[in-house]
Image: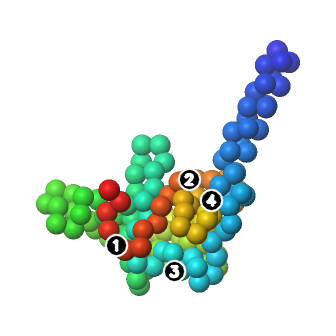
């Protein structure tokens, strides 16, 4: 039983370390670089089975690209707003949910979105332009 408990603790520490790696190991994007990175860009990210194609339009409008602006079934639409507060980005979705992240990664990505030292999203790319991720 003691061996199982020690093994579990070691495994948990390893998983926690991986989750923190993107936050602690990569430089935090701050100041004007954060604004430049997001303004007029599309964030392409996945977490599990969820996929995002979120356009950060100037003026703070946050749009979900979906299948594109001309698709008759699932067109692009505004889903909320985005803003930069201090050195973090906040996404406020229509209906009330808001999420604030620090953004970490090398110039050009990939980027990690973190809450404190917890990596929430890893491997995100940020394109210059309001385009599709595909």
- The reply to whether callout 4 and callout 1 are in contact (CB within 8 Å) is no
Q: Position of residue 120 (x, y in %)?
A: 58, 53
Q: Please say if 2 is above or below 85.
A: above
Q: Which residue is mark 1?
A: 130
At 56% from the left and 53% from the top, the residue drawn is: 122
Circle 2 sits in a helix, a strand or a loop, which is it? strand
Q: Which of the 4 quarters of the picture holds residue 31?
A: bottom right
Which dot marks residue 64? none
At 42% from the left and 68% from the top, the residue drawn is: 127
At 50% from the left and 58% from the top, the residue drawn is: 124
Image quadrant holding the N terminus, namely top right
Instruction: Single out the mark in the foreground, 4 or 3.
Output: 3
The residue at the far left in this view is 72
Which dot marks residue 114? 4
The residue at the far right in this view is 2
* Residues packed near mark 4 inside 10 Å, few (<14), some (14 to 19) or many (20 plus): many
Query: Spatial distance from mark 3 to mark 2, Cα to Cα?
Result: 20 Å
Q: Which residue is mark 3?
A: 36
């Amino acid at each position: 039983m003691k061996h199982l408990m020690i093994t579990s603790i070691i495994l948990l520490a390893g998983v926690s370390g991986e989750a923190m790696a993107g936050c602690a190991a990569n430089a935090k994007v701050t100041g004007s670089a954060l604004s430049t990175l997001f303004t007029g860009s599309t964030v392409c990210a996945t977490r599990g089975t969820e996929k995002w194609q979120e356009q950060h339009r100037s003026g703070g409008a946050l749009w979900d690209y979906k299948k594109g602006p001309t698709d008759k079934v699932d067109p692009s639409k505004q889903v909320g707003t985005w803003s930069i507060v201090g050195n973090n980005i906040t996404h406020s979705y229509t209906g009330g949910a808001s999420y604030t992240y620090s953004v970490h990664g090398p110039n050009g990505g990939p980027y990690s979105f973190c809450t404190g030292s917890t990596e929430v999203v890893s491997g995100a790319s940020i394109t210059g332009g309001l385009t599709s991720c595909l």
